[in-house]
Image: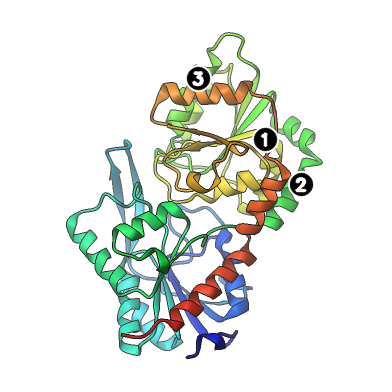
Amino acid sequence: MNPSSLTDRTRVALVTNMLPPYRIGFYNEIARHVDLTVVLDTLSEFNRGWQASADGHRFRTVIQNCRSFIYKRHREDVHYTEPRQFHFSEKTYGVLSAADPQVVVTAEYGFRTLWSLLYGWLHRVPVLVYSEGTCHTEGHVGLFKRLVRQLIVSRTARFWSNGPESSRLLESYGAASSEIDEGMTGIDTLEWQADVTHWRERRDETRMELGLKGRVFLFSGSLSARKGVLQMAEAVEAVAREPDCPEFSILALGDGEHRAKLEEWAAKNPGIRVVMPGFVQHHELPRYFAAADWAMLPTLDDNWPLATLETLVAGLPQLFSMYNGASADLCLPDTGLLFDPLDPENFRAILSAALRSPLERVPEERILQFSIHYSAASQGQRAAASIKAALARPRD
C-alpha cells in the first residue's frame, strides 16, 4: 500500500489488555484516520473499579476473554508487592485473521505481541509495539525476558512510547531512536480542563461539603504500596508535627489494599484532616481536582500515570515522584517540585515547602501548551503519522 493512501478505510488492529475510560478518546481519534478495531484480552481487570463499556465508540471492539491468572509482582528495590493479572491471549492470532488488518499495533511484550508478530510475518503486515515501560519499571528483567524483548524489537516496524523514559527502555532493547514515536499518551485534555473550570465556580461549596480546610493536597490513585501511600502518611504526619504548621487537609481519592491502614492511621491522628471519598469514577474526578490547591503522587513504580497530566491540566502544582515516568515530561519550575518518596526527610521537606509556599496555580500558557500536546486529537494525529511511516517501511 502507498503510505499516502492512508484513509479511514485502512484497516488497523490495536491489541491491548483492557479498555480504560481515559484511552477511549485516543482510540476514537485514531478511528478518524483509519478503520480501527481494538482487540482486548478483557474489558476490565480484577482490580479496576471504573465503569467500562465496549459500545458507543468510533472503533469496533473485540473482547477475547482470554484465560488469565493473578500473580504477585515483587519489587524489593522499592519495597512493595502487588497482585497483577496475566493474560494468555491465546486467541489473538485468530482474531487478527478474522479482522484482516493492514497494520497491527500491539501493547507491550506478552503473548498478544508474539501472536501479532506471527500474523505480521505471515501476512507481510507491519507491526508496531506500544511500549509504556521505563528502565525503572521494566528494565530489571532476567536474561530470558530480555532476549525475548530484543527479538520482538528486532521484528517491529515502529514503536509508540509515552516519552523519553519509555524510549530509553526501547533503545536498551535495540530500537533505533528514529523509529520511536513519543507522546502516545494523554487524555481528553480540553474536556477535562472545561470540567475542572466548571467545578471551580463551586469550589467553596465542595470544600465545605467535604470538610476541607486550609491548603488542600490531593492524592488520586490506588491506595496501594506501589503508589507510596504509606510513605505519604509518614511525611504528612512529620509535617503536621512541625512548629507553627499551617492548616492543611489531605484529600485521598481511590481505593485499594491499604485503605484500611490509611483509615486506621487517620483515626490515630485526629489533628490531621484526612478526607477519603473512596473510588471515584473518572468523569466525576474534576469536582475534586477543582477543590484542591496542590497534588502529590508519591508513586514508587509508574510508567506514565495520567493522574499527573490530569493534575497539570487542572492547574494544580504538584509533587512529582522521581519514580514517575511522566516527571521527565511534566515536571518544570512552574508545574511543581521533584522529590524522592523513599527518602523520608526529602519527602517531609518538599511537602513542607509546598505547604508554606505562595499559593499559585500553574500558568495558563503552560496549561494550554500541555493541553494541546496531550489532547486526544494530537495523539490521534501522531498515531496516524506513525502508521503511515510503518506502511512506508520496506518489507523484509
Q: Which residue is mark 3?
A: 237
- How far apart, in angstroms, are the residues tagged by discs 2 and 3? 32 Å
Indicate which disc, 1 or 2, sits on the residue closer to the N terminus: 2
Left or right, residue 69 beside residue 58: left
Left or right, residue 175 beside residue 9: left
Q: Is residue 76 in sight in this rendering? A: yes
Q: Which residue is mark 2?
A: 197
Give amino acid for label 3: Glu
Query: Which label number is shown at residue 120?
Result: none
Q: Which residue is mark 1?
A: 292
Establish if 87 lies above or below 340: below
- How far apart, in angstroms, are the residues tagged by discs 1 and 2? 13 Å
Establish if 33 lies above or below 262: below
Give amino acid for label 1: Ala
Residue 51 location, x and y as percent? Answer: 57, 59
Quarter of the view holding residue 33 = bottom right
